[in-house]
Image (cartoon, helix red, strand yellow):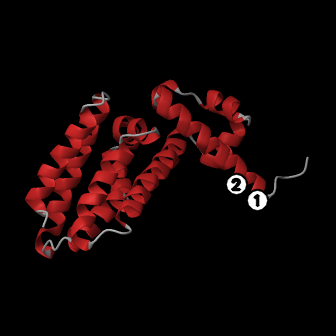
Amino acid sequence: MPRASAADAAETARRILDVATAHFAEHGYAAVSVDELARAASVTRGAVYHHYTSKPLLFAAVASAQQQIVADAIVEATAGSAPDAALRDGSHAFLDAITRGAASRVLLIDGPAVLGWEQWRRLDAEGPEQELRAGLREAGVSPALLDPLAAVLSGAMNELALWLAAHPDGAARPQAHRALDTLLDSVAPQT
């Protein structure tokens, strides 16, 4: 049997990742089997293991892709922002992006448990937190306070995102955004 081309292999890996994202988001990591993912992606179990080695590494790839989606939402929201507004615009974009779609379950619920705290924090630091740091710098935060303020805001926004994910009613989202504004006003008041 002829070997798949590099393009075919990349398409198979992408399809597996897409199916895994949907299944992990809907059912949670623990309830999803590799056999189920392989069937849904129309590939063999061996193909899943060939591209991702293990279920935990497949989940890590899904989580990394979701962190990138969140970081991209922040970049998009701040692209036309004035420097003094970028922190606020990016923070609101983070809250919306991480609490919608697959990101909520994958990053907030299963991510820390499946990946472990250290790997979960590394993914956050490489994506959304990097954008947060840029927003803090643009808001004029002194270098001496950059690390502690990034830690405080990142932790607070992650907790706010967990609260919002647990309160999916329509009133919770505006409340969460008002709470975020209150927090941000203490760091970088609006002018």
Q: Position of residue 70 (x, y in %)?
A: 40, 52
Q: Is residue 159 visible in the rendered structure shown here?
A: no
Q: Amino acid at mark 1?
A: Ala
* 2 and 1 marks in contact (CB < 8 Å): yes
Q: Going 36% across and 69% down the picture, which residue do you hit?
A: 80
Q: Judging from the image, what secondary structure is the residue with disc 2 in?
A: helix
Q: Would residue 40 appear left or right of 87 to someone viewing this image?
A: right
Q: Would residue 50 appear left or right of 160 to someone viewing this image?
A: right
User: Which residue is at the front of the view, 118 or 73?
Assistant: 73
The furthest residue to the front: 191
The furthest residue to the left: 186
Q: Would residue 141 appear left or right of 51 to someone viewing this image?
A: left
Q: Is 99 rendered above or below residue 69?
A: above
Question: Mark 2 to mark 1: distance in Å?
Answer: 6 Å
Mark 2, residue position: 10
Q: Going 40% across and 35% down the picture, which residue do you hit?
A: 105
Mark 1, residue position: 6
Q: Position of residue 139 (x, y in %)?
A: 19, 70
